[in-house]
Image: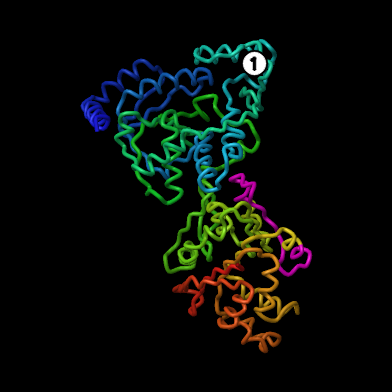
Amino acid sequence: MIKLTKIILKYLLRRLQNPSKKIKELLGDEQGLLFDNRRRVFFFINEKLTIHELTVIRSAIMKKLRGIRPLTYVKIDDIITGYYDKCMERYLYERLNRHKPNEDTCWFKYAQNNKNFGWVDKDTPFGSSERKQVLNILLKRKPYFKIDVDKMSVCLERDCDGYVYTPSDRIIKEDDKVLPLYRSIKRKGFSNIISSLSPIILGYSKKTGRYNAISGRHRIAVLRYLRSQGEIGNRKIRCHIVEHPFERLDYTGPHTESCRKCLWGDEYDPGRGTHQDFYVREGVAVMRGKKNKKGGGQKWSRILPVFKEAVLNKNILDVGAHRGMYCTKALEYGASHVTALEPAAYLVDVLHAIRKNYILDDFEVIMGNFYNESDYTSLINNKYDTVFFFGIIHHLLRIGIQKGILYSFDELFQRISNIAGYGIIVEFAMPTEKSLGLPELVPYRAAFSHEVFERALRKAFPRVRNLGRCKYRSGNKYGRFMYYGRKE
């Protein structure tokens, strides 16, 4: 109670301060820094500052802005972060969604131990004296560092952009402090009062269109993570914003190839329409589209109660993965590995783009066919736990009959059972395609019925739950039924 009272008093005192006066003092001290009164944003006018000068200015700005109450708000969805702010968001995802230990997270394998801390023009020599000069500059900025310049200079390396780092494979076992902050904010909620007392300061690069947190990095990571999980709305965050024409205001940046390519904070849009209408942000498939259309929301609401049980710590196969919405969801809900089997080349490209953009090492993409014997043998050998069949089961029966491979749901589910060690999530739709009127399919019309489908499913997966019907305003008027089946 005493602590809360002190916070409230401190906040009230901060409210009484005149931020305009302090801003004028800051602008007087920092040459080349201006303030846009209309947008309430700080910005640089000198576009030729060196990285060393930027680092010094950044430290001064961070120190002085901490004493000024922010006048600006920015929505969470507008904050597209760069390295290494997005690394902390991914760290939360990997620890909380993927259940990875510290030593297996990107943050501890790459970013945390291998941050850049100096810069030397990539076109100049990088010998012993240049290496020592980098360390001496670092010590001037951070005199509390205890390093042996002669010993450490031997370990320094320079990347293709001139940034200097020292490689390390050291793994820290303790959780990063962003985890307890996440638990605190989730339990108590987030208030902009804290940002008035200890301001969030965001640098915005006009060159990259991204933000980098100058101060409040952990809070931004937690809020963006909670937003990606749908646990909070697109709320406004009180903060200072410093616009600049540079890539970043500090040395910190990635040097590993995977870090350079990672677009974790970006949105990837595979396209609108169809039964998978979604976009990806922070590795999460965010569904959109109208409630009664085929955007995937109806299916998701029905399978959600069983989805985590079906995928957690399991090897997942999505047959006819399409754009990969359910593959992405499986990773989000803790699958150990996900494989997308898709025969269409243009959709395989989309799946590869998701895998590449978000560096999803546990996401495998196979361009293949369920009825190709070589592909099918490979699926059996991979020993999958749970298999997805969204919107294709009746198509598989039709194709099986036309190819002369199988003639009933009984045979189809037996073929599926051979590759699913644990269970299945399957969507049944009453076939309405004109192709069922083809002469070779007419004798088998009864084989496509709902009753026959459900009976065959129960033979292969005895523990079956009918998760309910999806009825769209367009498409199949009979409706689509979602099922979850398990063997044990």
Quadrant of the rendering where the C terminus is positioned: bottom right
- Image x and y of residue 273, in percent: 51, 63
Q: Residue at left 32%, top 31%?
A: 70
Q: Is residue 51 left or right of residue 289?
A: right
- Residue furthest toward the right? 374
Foreground: 51 or 442? 442
Please tell me in which quadrant of the rendered image residue 395 appears: bottom right
Magenta-span inclusion, residue 376: yes
Q: So how many labels did they put on this image? A: 1
Q: Residues within 10 Å of mark 1 (few under 14, many from 20)?
A: few
- Residue furthest toward the bottom? 443
Scheme by which the image is coloured: rainbow
Please tell me in which quadrant of the rendered image residue 199 appears: top left
Q: Residue at left 53%, top 40%?
A: 91
Residue position for label 1: 152
The three-letter code of the residue at mark 1 reads Met
Q: Residue at left 34%, top 26%?
A: 35
Q: Residue at left 61%, top 47%?
A: 360
- Image x and y of residue 274, in percent: 53, 65
Q: Please report the bounds of the magenta region as a residue range.
A: 353-377
239 versus 187 height, above or below: above
Foreground: 159 or 421? 421
